[in-house]
Image (cartoon, helix red, strand yellow):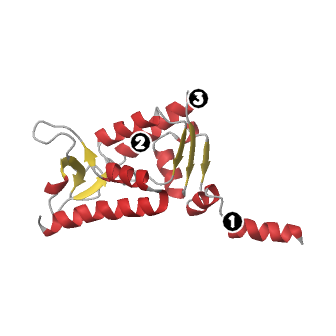
Amino acid sequence: MDEHQGRTIGFALDLARSSRDAFGAEAAIQALRTALELVDEDDSQEGELRGRLAAALQAGAATQTVAIGRVPAAQMILDIGPATAKDIADRLAGCRTLVWNGPLGCFEVPPFDAGTNAVAQAAARLTRAGSLLSVAGGGDTVAALTHAGAIDGFSYVSAAGGAFLEWLEGKTLPGIAALEASAAS
């Protein structure tokens, strides 16, 4: 393994560790699936990890999907790929609740918005159909859902990011605590 391959795999593992520490083992697995594209092509092993890559973060940049062990040094993983977006959308169809915090790629710059757009639109369709309760939070998430044209299809959207997640966890929020203390006195 060359130095770049180690850095690329290290990035994916750091993402998985952060997800595991914050949300558990299943989130770590999903983070890896999100960061790295799983596709089956004639020239690859079934289920081989692949990434959607580009040399630059700029609108209209040429992209490619390659095996994660073959990510060239001059390339960056900037979005989930189409197979991962489809996999997440398919999994949502079997869910009753979605809590979304954070875009799935660099959604601000096409074509790296494709994964976020596809999953957001699938979640909005399921919510409108009444089969999914979709809750989203965070400024980047609000911007991504707006960009995807899906924000009105979500059940609840909050501009709060970290505070939104802490509230869902049942933690005491300093601002709320101050208001409650003021109201009590």
Find numbered disc 1 in the image and state the secondary structure of the residue it sits on: loop
- Image coordinates for residue 73, horizontal then vertical, percent: 16, 64
Label 3 to label 1: alpha-carbon separation: 31 Å
Task: Kindly identify the residue that appears in the image at 30 percent across and 60 percent down.
Answer: 12
Left or right of residue 176: residue 118: left
Return the residue at label 1.
172
Q: Quadrant of the N terminus?
A: bottom left
Q: Quadrant of the C terminus?
A: bottom right
Answer with the quarter of the image where residue 154 lies: top right
The residues bearing labels 2 and 1 have C-alpha atoms spaced at a distance of 33 Å
Q: Secondary structure under badge 3? A: loop
Q: Which residue is denoted by mark 2 in the rendering?
A: 117
The reply to whether discs 2 and 1 touch (Cβ–Cβ < 8 Å) is no
Which amino acid lies under the numbered mark 1 shown in the image of this protein?
A: Thr
| Type of the residue with mark 2 | Asn
Q: Which mark is residue 130?
A: 3
Provide the secondary structure element on which disc 2 rests.
Answer: helix
